[in-house]
Image (spheres, helix red, strand yellow):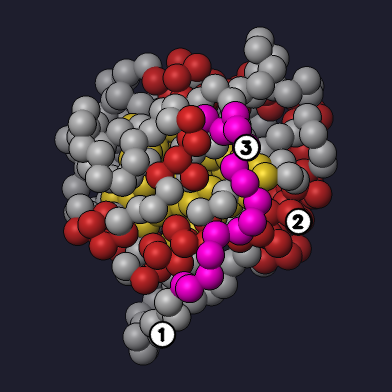
Amino acid sequence: MPGPRAAAPRAADPQAAAPQAAALPAAAPQAAALPAAAPQAAALPAAAPQAAAPPAAAPRATDPRAAGAGAVGAGARGSRVRAPRTASARLSHGHDVSSHQKHVDWPEARAEGARFVYVKATESTDYRNPYFSRQYGGAREAGLIRGAYHFARPDESSGARQAAYFVRHGGDWRADGWTLPPALDIEYNPYGGSDKCYGLSDRRMVRWIRSFSDEIRRETGRRPVIYTTTQWWRLCTGNSRAFSSHALWIARHGGEGPGELPGGWRRWTFWQYGVKGGLPGDQNLFHGPAGRLRSFARG
C-alpha cells in the first residue's frame, strides 16, 4: 500500500512478493470483523462536494510514493496485474492510494470496477498526505466507500500519540455506510536497513499496536483494520494472537490466494494482491460482495 517515506516495503518483503499456489479461501462472514448486512431503509445522503485545497503540509521528500516507488498513477495501464482467477462476484474490488497518485480520476476508477479505496492520511506524527482531502472527497463523490490509513513508525513515538494524530488528520470514522474503519499499516521498517522491527522486541511491538488500537477505539468507536504481512507479523510480534478480533488486511502478491494468515486470524477482510493493475495504486479485494462491504463500513 502507499506507505513509508523511504524504500517501498512491498519489494523488500518476500512474503508479500513471493508467488504461492494456495487457493483463495471461500468467502464467508467474519465472526469478529464482518457484521451481517442490514437492509437499508433509506438511501444514504449525498456527500457535499470537496472544495478545499490539499493540506498545507508538504510530502516528505523521501516518501517512496512521491518518488514513484511501487505504484502506478491514475490512468497508468502498463504491466497490469490481473485479479486472481478465483475472484468472483462474491468479492469486491478496490485499491489504495497516497500522494504518489496525486489527482486520481475517480469516475474512471469506479468504471474500472473499484468499489472501495483506502487513502494514506498520515505517517508518524509529522507527515500528512497533501492530496488527502481531494482524494478522500473525490472517492466519495464518485460513489466509492473510502477509508484512511496511517503508516506506523513505532520507533518515533507511542502508538496512542500516532493514533491521535491520525484521527485529527483524516482517520476519523462515521457510521454512514461510506466510511471504512481507520487502518494501521504496520510492516517492515523501510528506514532502518536490517532493523525490520523498528528496534522493538516482539513484546514491545505488541504493546505499541495495542496502544494505537486502544486510542483509535477510544476516539472513533471502532478497532482499526490491521495491514501487514504474515512474515513481518511473525518476526516482529512473535506471531501474536492478541489482535485476532481486528479486521485483517493481508498483503501477499503474485498468487491465487493470500496464503497462510498470521497470528490468530482465521479470515482476511482485505487482501492486497498486487501493486499494479487496472486501478490507481495497489490492487485489493474485500472478502465479500458490495452489500457486505457496506455493512462492514457501517459497523
Image check: 215 left or right of 227? right
Q: Is residue 169 above or below residue 51?
A: above
Q: Is residue 229 above or below residue 115?
A: above
* Mark number, residue 164: 2
For the residues labelled 1 and 3, the Cα–Cα distance comes to 36 Å
Residue at screen point 74% across, 54% down: 165
Q: Which residue range is magenta in the image?
A: 50-64
Q: Nearer the viewer, residue 245 or 299?
A: 299
Q: Quadrant of residue 222?
A: bottom right
Q: Amino acid at mark 3?
A: Arg
* Mark number, residue 45: 1
Residue at screen point 37% across, 57% down: 116
> What secondary structure is marked by label 2?
helix
SS majority, magenta? loop
Residue at screen point 20% across, 31% down: 78
Q: Amino acid at mark 2?
A: Ala
